[in-house]
Image (cartoon, helix red, strand yellow):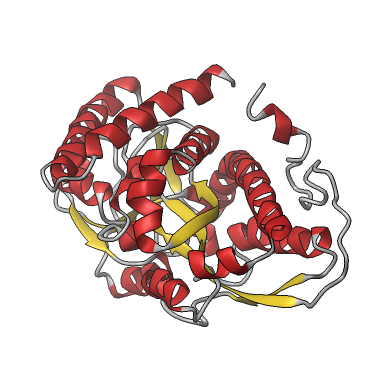
């Protein structure tokens, strides 16, 4: 992959810590140490925390010469996944993980990066979304009203179907299946193909599968392993593009605005670097994750172009419906969709 964020590529070494980020190291006069509380819902050992969150915290500590330190609360220790935005806004956490689907009522525009059929790799989706995050439309309509700002984000690779009793090859195969959905656009997609979307946070998927209240998931490959779901799902797809998920870490405006300007700059720079690095981690992990799942007994079917077409046709309908539904509420849905598609074109031109 060439020319993607040329100023960051040298820093993003897959499988290695993010040490240095290839950025200049400012000299600081040692002042009072400030500890920030970071909270997320990922289980211990999850690849996002191990390859993204922890290295990011280490780099911030290093670049501030210890002026900033962190207390890290994984695995929903401070609250449920769907509550972490509120907990960050209220000050229970200073920096919180926000799964954008869990807060689509408050932050609806981020769902544009979760629309099915939009992109083929995590880096395409992530870097296009990150360009949007830095733009005026998203800042004004998504983040400013919630009094938070994004530190870094990962848009996962296109989701696949993972099912318990039935191999998915065509649209007919998913009709009537109860599938875990992230909500928002994925709910619309699931209904249009005849499935029954069940909106639950990822940490609750295992229990639902074990009880038989789910027939499967629309899910990323790596997370099947991270949430230990491989003993329940028996079938998976390859080559599908059934939506995605935006995992973002945000800091409250109140906390960010009180930080020294040089520290704010470090948070922004290290967040940019983490975003660029993590999408590569995700893309490089797809084949490995699928190999592990196959070894655990998951049987894959690679969708042919003819099998994908009905899903792709529905995906285009979903994108237009998503934008139209926001427009009707007086929100710039069509504008955000247009900007995201333009950002995707720009990102692809640099690959």
Percent coordinates x, y for residue 349 in the rendering: 53, 17
Instruction: Let me know if residue 287 appears in the view.
Output: yes
> Outermost residue, top direction?
349
Say which residue appears at 33% left-offset and 57% top-offset. 101
Horizontal side of residue 316 vs 243, given as left or right: left
Comparing 64 with 192, the one in front is 64
Quadrant housing residue 90 = bottom left
Vertical relation: 81 (above or below) 164: below
Say which residue appears at 51% left-offset and 61% top-offset. 250
Quadrant housing residue 206 = bottom left
Q: Quadrant of the C terminus?
A: top right
Vertical relation: 252 (above or below) 338: below
Q: Quadrant of the N terminus?
A: top right
Horizontal side of residue 299 vs 271, given as left or right: left
Horizontal side of residue 223 vs 317, given as left or right: right
Say which residue appears at 27% left-offset and 48% top-offset. 186
Comparing 292 with 10, the one in front is 10
Percent coordinates x, y for residue 225 in the rendering: 53, 59
Percent coordinates x, y for residue 56 in the rendering: 70, 58
Comparing 171 with 22, the one in front is 22
Instruction: Let me know if residue 244 appears in the view.
Output: no
Percent coordinates x, y for residue 124 in the rendering: 50, 32
| Number of marks drawn | 0
Say which residue appears at 33% left-offset and 63% top-offset. 102
Vertical relation: 223 (above or below) 154: below
């Amino acid at each position: 992959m060439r020319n993607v964020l040329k100023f960051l590529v040298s820093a993003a070494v897959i499988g290695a810590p993010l040490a240095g980020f290839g950025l200049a190291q400012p000299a600081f006069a040692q002042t009072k140490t400030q500890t920030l509380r970071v909270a997320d819902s990922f289980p211990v050992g999850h690849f996002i925390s191990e390859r993204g969150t922890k290295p990011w915290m280490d780099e911030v500590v290093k670049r501030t010469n210890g002026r900033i330190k962190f207390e890290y609360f994984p695995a929903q220790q401070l609250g449920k996944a769907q509550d972490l935005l509120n907990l960050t806004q209220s000050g229970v956490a200073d920096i919180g993980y926000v799964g954008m689907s869990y807060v689509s009522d408050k932050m609806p525009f981020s769902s544009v990066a979760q629309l099915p059929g939009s992109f083929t790799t995590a880096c395409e989706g992530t870097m296009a979304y990150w360009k949007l995050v830095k733009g005026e439309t998203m800042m004004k309509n998504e983040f400013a009203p919630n009094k938070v700002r994004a530190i870094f984000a990962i848009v996962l690779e296109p989701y696949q179907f993972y099912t318990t009793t039935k191999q998915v090859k065509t649209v007919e195969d998913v009709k009537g299946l109860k599938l875990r959905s992230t909500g928002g656009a994925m709910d619309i997609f699931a209904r249009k193909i005849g499935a029954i979307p069940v909106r639950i946070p990822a940490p609750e998927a295992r229990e639902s599968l074990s009880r038989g209240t789910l027939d499967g998931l629309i899910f990323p490959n790596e997370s099947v392993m991270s949430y230990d779901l491989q003993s329940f799902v028996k079938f998976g797809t390859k080559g599908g593009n059934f939506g995605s998920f935006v995992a973002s870490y945000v800091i409250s405006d109140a906390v960010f605005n009180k930080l020294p300007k040089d520290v704010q700059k470090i948070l922004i720079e290290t967040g940019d670097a983490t975003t660029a690095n993590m999408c590569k981690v995700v893309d490089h992990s797809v084949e490995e994750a699928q190999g592990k799942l196959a070894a655990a007994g998951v049987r894959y079917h690679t969708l042919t172009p003819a099998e994908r077409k009905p899903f792709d046709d529905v995906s285009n309908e979903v994108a237009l419906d998503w934008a139209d539904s926001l427009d009707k509420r007086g929100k710039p849905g069509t504008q955000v969709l247009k900007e995201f598609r333009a950002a995707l074109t720009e990102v692809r031109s640099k690959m």
